[in-house]
Amino acid sequence: MLTFDLLHTDPANADTGYAGSHARRGTLTLNHGVVQTPIFMPVGTYGTVKGVMPSSLEDMGAQIILGNTFHLWMRPGQDVMQSFGGLHGFERWNKPILTDSGGFQVWSLGAMRKITEQGVHFSSPVNGDKLFMSPEVSMQIQTTLNSDIVMQLDECTPYLSVEPKTKGQITTEREARTSMEMSLRWAKRSQDEFARLENPNALFGIVQGGMFEHLRQESLEALVAMNFPGYAVGGVSVGEPKDEMLRIMAHSPHRLPTNKPRYLMGVGTPEDLVEGVAQGVDMFDCVMPTRNARNGTLFTRYGDLKIRNARHKTDHGPLDPTCTCYACKGVTRPDGSVSGGFSRAYLHHLDRCAEMLSPMLSSIHNLHYYLNLMAEIRASLESGTFGAFRAQFKADRARGV
C-alpha cells in the first residue's frame, strides 16, 4: 500500500522577486506508517544504522530507514528473515523501511561479477559461493524482507566506462543507452514478479541514462507508462563531477508525475539535499552522515567541523550551539539533572583515544542535523518561505564554524 498526498508547493513571490522552485511538501502513507516529506532516510545496511540505537533514531525523528537487500541476502539469509516475518521483526523497527534492489552492490563488485540480460552472476564476497541475482530473485528477497518500499533491480550506469576497450574513460552515449534499456526491461520483469508474489507493499521504478538528459527522458517516460507507485532517480553520485550531478538533478525529478513520490538515490551533502528539494525531490538517502561521523567530520548549521583538529582540544562549547541533539544539548531527566550535552574538547578526546562512544555520538549528531534540516525545509514550505530559507541556509553554511 502507498498513498501520496501533495500538501504544499513552493510559490513564486512577486514582492521579493523569488521565482519559486519545484519544491513540495507531502505525506507518504505506507503499510508501517506515515512519512512526512521531504524526508532524509538513514541507511541501515545490515539491518542497523551503524552505531546508533533504534531508540535514538526515534528520538531524533527518523520516520523511515533503509535496509540493504544484497547484504541481508548474504547474511543472515532469507531463511532467518522469513522466521522473523521480515526485516521489521528482525531489527525491531516498527516504522517504514525501504530496501534497495541489490543492483548497486552487485555493480560495485567489479571483476567479481558478470552482467547478462538474464541477471548478474557473481562470487559471494562473504564465502566465494557462486550466486545469481535477477529481477525475479531481487523481488523474492525483498518480499521476504517485507519492506514498505521495494526497488526494481537496475544496472547502475557508471560515470566511467567498464567496457574493456575504453575502461576508465567517461561512459559513452551508446554504453549508457544499452545499460538504460536493459534496466527498463528489468523494470518490467521486476514489476511482473512483484505482482506474481502478491507483495502488498510498493514497488518503485528507477530512472537511469547516465549523464545524458535525452536518455534520462526516455527512461522516465517508459517507466511512467508502466505506472509504478513511485519513482527514483538512480545513477548519480557514482563518481561524476558535482556540476554533472547537479545538471541531472535539475533535469529529472520535476518531470516525474506530481501525484507520486520522487526519490533521489545516494545523495548527499546538506547542500545537495536543499538543492534536491528545490528540484522536486521528496526522499533522500546517503551513508554520508554516519560515514563522515566515523571519520571525524561533523555537519553543523555553520559548515563542517573536523573534530580531530587540535584547536578543539580545550574548547568547552558544543559541536553546534543551535543543535538540540543528545551530543550537543543532552536531555533533562525528571529530577532536573542533564544527561549528555558534551563539549568539543570531550569529543576530540574520545576521537583521539579511538573510544567507541566517539563515532556513536558523532553519528547521532550528524543524523539529527540531517533530519532537523528536513524538518526546517518542511516548515518553510508550509509557511511559503522556502526561498528565504534556502538563501539563509547557504549564507549560514558559508559562514564557517
Image (tube, rainbow, N blue to C red):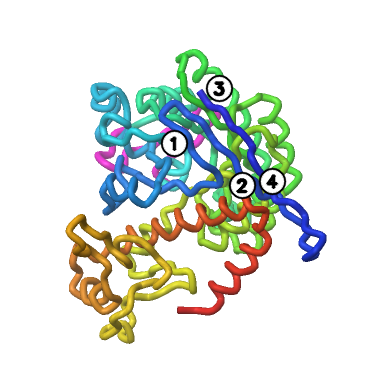
Q: Amino acid at mark 3?
A: Gln
* Residue at mark 3 to residue at mark 1: CA–CA distance: 16 Å
Distance CA(mark 3)–CA(mark 4): 30 Å
* Circle number at residue 191: 3
Task: For marks 3 and 2, give the one nearer the viewer.
Answer: 2
Cα gap from disc 3 to disc 2, whole angstroms? 23 Å
Q: Looking at the rendering, which quadrant does residue 139 occupy?
A: top left
The magenta region covers 110-129
Type of residue at label 2? Val
Lower position in the chain sequence, tag 4 or tag 1: 4
Residue on which the image places disc 4: 9
Pick the residue in front: 237 or 318: 318
Q: Quadrant of residue 207?
A: top right
Query: Which secondary structure, mark 3?
Result: helix
Residue tagged by mark 1? 98
| Residue displayed at 47% across by 43% down | 104
Say whether residue 127 is magenta. Answer: yes
Q: Earlier in the sequence, mark 3 or mark 1?
A: 1
Crowd rating for badge 1 (residues with CA inside 10 Å; few <14, some 14–19, many 20+): many
